[in-house]
Image (tube, grey):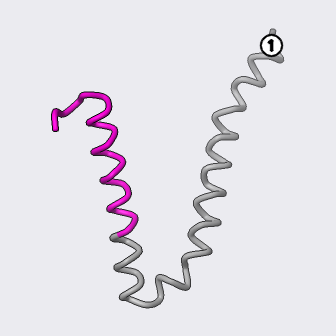
Amino acid sequence: MKDFLQNISRYPRYLISISLGIFFALFERFKPVLSNPVSAIALVGLVGGTFLFLVFTLRAMLGLNPV
C-alpha cells in the first residue's frame, strides 16, 4: 500500500512538468512572432479572445451567469 501511495503522490508533479513543458515549447515557437509589434498585438488579442470565449461558453453551459 505504501508503494501505491507513493505512485499516486507523483502524479501532480508529473502533471506540472508536462504542463510547463508544453508552455515552454509553445513559447519558443511563438517567440519570433513576438518580435514584430503588430504580430504581438494580434497574438495577444487572439489568446485573450479565445480565453474569453471559453469563459463565456462555460458560464452559459454551467448556468453560472444567465446570458
Residue 65, percent from left and from top: 18, 33
Q: Which residues are magenta?
A: 46-67
Residue that protrudes farthest toward the left in the picture: 66
Residue 4, percent from left and from top: 79, 16
Location of mark 1 (residue): 2
Q: Is residue 11 left or right of residue 59?
A: right
Corner quadrant of residue 41: bottom left
Q: Is residue 35 left or right of residue 59?
A: right
Of residues 34 and 16, which is closer to you in this image?
A: 34
**Mark 1 packing: few (<14 Cα in 10 Å), some, or many (20+)?**
few
Q: Is residue 8 above or below residue 57?
A: above
Query: Magenta span: helix, strand or loop, mainly?
Result: helix
Q: Is residue 64 left or right of residue 61?
A: left
Q: Is residue 1 above or below residue 38?
A: above
Of residues 53 and 7, which is closer to you in this image?
A: 53
Q: Residue at x 62, y 44 (%)?
A: 16
